[in-house]
Amino acid sequence: LGCGPVGLLTVKWAFLLGAERVIAVDSVDYRLRHAASYGAEVMNLKDYDNTGMEIKEKTHGGADVVIDCVGMDGKMSVVEKVESALKLQAGSKS
């Protein structure tokens, strides 16, 4: 979950460690394109009402391993979306 720098490194690492299938999940298109270029299947959070159920269906019961590289709630509030769109936030919230 999450295709920022840590998530993309995790995608590469998973393949290096022998994973046959990696599903990368994010809501940012260019990050998903990077993950796909590394061989991951991608899922955009914006495309699904219930991403967890979609993954469960795609994997016939659920993922063997899930690695959270987001570090916060995946759903953004309206204020957070505005901050992000206007680039008002310059770091992680504590």
Image (cartoon, rainbow, N blue to C red):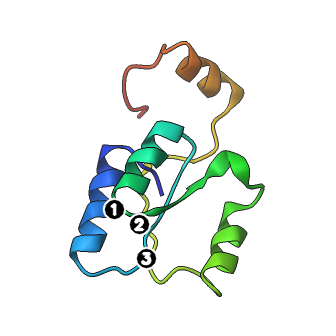
- Give me the C-alpha separation between circle 3 and circle 2: 13 Å
10 Å crowding of disc 1: few (<14), some (14-19), many (20+): many
Residue type at the position of mark 3: Arg
Locate residue 88, reporting x and y percent: 48, 13
Q: Earlier in the sequence, mark 1 or mark 2?
A: 1
Tell me the number on the disc at residue 21: 3
Q: What's the residue at 27%, 62% (across, down)? A: 12
Locate residue 39, reporting x and y percent: 38, 63
Q: What's the residue at 38%, 44% (across, down)? A: 4
Tell me the number on the disc at residue 11: 1
Q: What's the residue at 63%, 37% (across, down)? A: 76
Q: Quadrant of the C terminus?
A: top left
Mark 3 or mark 2, which is nearer to you? 3
- Give me the C-alpha separation between circle 1 and circle 2: 10 Å
Mark 2, residue position:
67
Residue type at the position of mark 2: Ile
- Give me the C-alpha separation between circle 3 and circle 1: 10 Å
